Image (tube, rainbow, N blue to C red):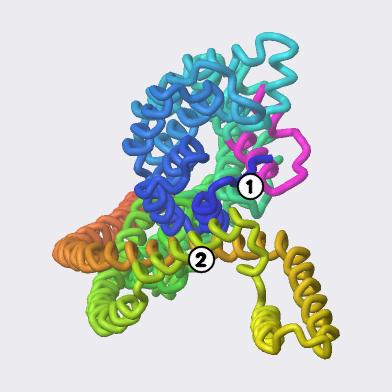
């Protein structure tokens, strides 16, 4: 268990665990600037690097990790840092940089991180088309019984990557066997069931490419009807049946698929594949109707796509996403949960599924947050300026009163009185003079006894006053005895009082020195605050239009990415419509040729 020993580091962690990453990193950097976290210096740097990574600032994070390594960070900390850096770079699409970071890992990562590292390494190899290298890397894990057990424990993703890599690297038999194993595994949760469907689709289409229609159909039958891969599975199952010259069997999956959302390319293909199956069965009328319906549907869908494109370029998509997915802060792990109102919301499925669109939109949202944050700080600077004016005024008003009160206290005179009392104490203690420590009552009694004794002495030696003289002598002796008894305690009390006086005089001198220092420091402190505010104001004023410009540019990027995806769907519609029209022409030609043959037959 890690104990937080610096309160400011705990404050940073509090914001971090609240998912307020921007507040966390700014608080952290301020505390680092003022050196408020000496006991967590390295941990704070690692956290700062991770927070910068969360915003995609991989170069800055890399510099932090490199500095930690140069300082002699523990190998385990260093390797984890490079792994996370590689992962973020991969997600951002910086593949060479991700490979460079992954290569800096020297040891074995703890727990599941090592399996994640192998998976990431294989993804990087496949991303640049090195399927042979990916297969060799992943096959090396399963080269031993321990490795096979570890690969199974690592989860199905590693085995899926290995199967795909083997197929694409020229070893389809081994790859198909591994994908078949994944396609048959139990599905305890949605994640595993989706991966199982993906493995079966990959296995089925591999079999179709190799003209193994029966094997393709067997694999595709295992795909769920309502999963993410169901459209591809239905399309492939129909083509497997068509390859086997069983167009009647192809009608069922294609008819189901043709009625689904036309935003998927598989659905568009099914709409022309279905009349193709009717034509193969000799149902030319249904085939003609099917092609005509497909062309009409393609034209209508093209018009809907144009409406969606106009809405996107008008800003409805971006503004709606921002409005329906609010967030207190910027953050790289923020996700889109609610869709905006659009003319045809189904078109957004393929748009939002793009990794590039998601990343571009996060950048846009972060820029919007920064613009709002800068605007708020611009307002705060005005408030800080007013606060500074009030502080100056309050200081100017209070200073004369404080100086007057301080001047009324004459510390030097008090010091002289203290020294005189200390001298008297030392003299009395040296003479062991109990009378010097008599209290008011005892002093009064001493004075009265002295007066009585003086009067008795004035009366001479008259025997009538012998009894009075005896009483006076006894009273004086009792008083002297009492003073002697009280002497030690009263000396101690006097010295204690003297020490208290010394402390109070010392505190008074310290306050006097602090007051003098404050008269020098406070005006300078006010000047520094004023200079800081004046320096920040033009900086913020310059940053706001720059961020606004970047936000507009990024909004255009986001919108054009969405438009490009919809334009791609339009282009697919054109291709399928052309194929449908060509098939219609073939059917008409076939029908015309049949009529001509019928007329020529009687002759």
Q: Is residue 586 in sight in this rendering?
A: no
Between discs 1 and 2, the one toward the N terminus = 1
Alpha-carbon distance for marks 1 and 2? 111 Å
Please tell me whether residue 487 belongs to the stretch shown in magenta: no
Question: Is 433 in front, or is 332?
Answer: 433
Q: Quadrant of the image for the N terminus? A: top right
Residue 69 quadrant: top left
Residue furthest out toward the right: 467
Disc 2: CA contacts within 10 A as few (<14), some (14-19) or many (>=20): some
Residue lying farthest top?
144
Please tell me the numbered disc located at residue 248: 1
Relative vertical location of residue 280 with respect to residue 542 in this rendering, above or below = above
User: Residue at 66% of width from left, 77% of height from top?
Assistant: 439
Instruction: Report x, y in % for residue 289.
Output: 47, 62
Instruction: Examine the rendered structure and indicate whether residue 2 appears above or below residue 330.
Output: above
Please provide percent x and percent y for residue 166.
Answer: 55, 19
| Secondary element type, mark 1 | helix
Magenta stretch, main secondary structure, is: helix
Q: Relative to the observer, which residue lies in front, 264 or 336? A: 336
Span highlighted in magenta in the image: 178-201
Residue at 40% over, 45% down: 35
Tell me if 104 is positioned left or right of 495 in this view.
left
Q: Nearer the viewer, residue 137 or 29?
A: 29
Report the mark closest to the observer, 1 or 2.
2
The residue carrying mark 2 is 501
**Number of numbered tags placed on the structure image:** 2
């Amino acid at each position: 268990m890690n104990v937080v020993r610096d309160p400011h580091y705990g404050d940073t962690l509090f914001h971090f665990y609240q998912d307020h990453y921007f507040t966390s990193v700014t608080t952290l950097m301020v505390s680092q600037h003022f050196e408020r976290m000496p006991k967590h210096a390295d941990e704070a740097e690692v956290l700062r690097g991770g927070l910068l990574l969360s915003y995609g600032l991989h170069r800055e994070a890399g510099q932090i990790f490199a500095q930690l390594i140069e300082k002699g960070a523990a190998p385990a900390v260093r390797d984890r840092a490079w792994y996370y850096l590689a992962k973020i770079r991969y997600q951002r699409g910086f593949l060479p940089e991700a490979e460079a970071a992954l290569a800096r890992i020297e040891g074995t990562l703890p727990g599941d991180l090592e399996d994640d590292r192998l998976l990431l390494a294989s993804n990087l190899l496949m991303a640049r088309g090195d399927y042979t290298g990916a297969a060799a890397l992943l096959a090396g894990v399963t080269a031993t019984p321990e490795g096979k057990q570890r690969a199974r424990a690592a989860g199905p993703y590693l085995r899926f990557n290995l199967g795909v890599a083997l197929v694409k690297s020229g070893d389809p038999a081994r790859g198909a066997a591994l994908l078949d194993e994944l396609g048959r595994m139990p599905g305890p949760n949605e994640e595993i069931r989706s991966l199982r469907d993906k493995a079966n689709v990959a296995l089925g289409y591999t079999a179709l490419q190799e003209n193994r229609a029966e094997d393709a159909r067997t694999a595709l039958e295992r795909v769920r009807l309502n999963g993410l891969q169901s459209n591809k599975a239905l399309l492939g199952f129909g083509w497997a049946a068509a390859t086997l010259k069983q167009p009647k069997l192809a009608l069922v999956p294609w008819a189901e698929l043709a009625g689904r959302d036309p935003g998927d390319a598989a659905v568009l293909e099914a709409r022309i594949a279905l009349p193709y199956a009717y034509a193969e069965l000799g149902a030319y009328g249904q085939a003609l109707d099917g092609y005509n319906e497909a062309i009409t549907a393609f034209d209508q869908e093209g018009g809907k796509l144009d409406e969606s494109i106009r809405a996107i370029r008008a800003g409805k998509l971006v503004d709606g996403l921002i409005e329906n997915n609010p967030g207190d802060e910027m953050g790289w792990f923020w996700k889109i949960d609610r869709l905006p109102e659009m003319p045809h919301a189904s078109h957004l499925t393929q748009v939002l599924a793009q990794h590039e669109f998601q990343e571009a939109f996060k950048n846009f949202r972060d820029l919007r947050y920064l613009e709002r944050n800068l605007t708020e700080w611009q307002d705060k600077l005005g408030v800080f300026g007013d606060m500074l004016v009030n502080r100056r005024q309050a200081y100017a008003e209070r200073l004369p009163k404080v100086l007057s009160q301080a001047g009324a206290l004459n510390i030097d005179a008090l010091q002289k009185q203290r020294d005189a009392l200390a001298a008297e104490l030392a003299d009395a203690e040296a003479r062991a003079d109990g009378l010097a420590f008599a209290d008011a009552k005892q002093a009064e009694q001493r004075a009265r006894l002295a007066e009585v004794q003086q009067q008795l002495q004035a009366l001479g030696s008259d025997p009538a006053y012998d009894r009075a003289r005896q009483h006076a002598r006894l009273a004086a002796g009792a008083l002297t005895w009492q003073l002697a008894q009280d002497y030690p305690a009263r000396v101690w009390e006097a010295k204690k009082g003297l020490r208290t006086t010394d402390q109070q005089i010392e505190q008074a001198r310290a306050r006097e020195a602090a007051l003098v220092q404050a008269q020098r420091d406070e005006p300078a402190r006010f000047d520094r605050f004023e200079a800081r505010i004046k320096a920040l104001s033009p900086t913020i004023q310059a940053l706001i239009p720059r961020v606004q410009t970047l936000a507009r540019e990024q909004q255009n990027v986001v919108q054009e990415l969405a438009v490009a995806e919809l334009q791609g769907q339009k282009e697919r519609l054109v291709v399928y419509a052309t194929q449908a029209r060509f098939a219609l022409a073939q059917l008409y030609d076939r029908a015309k040729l049949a009529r001509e043959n019928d007329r020529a037959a009687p002759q």
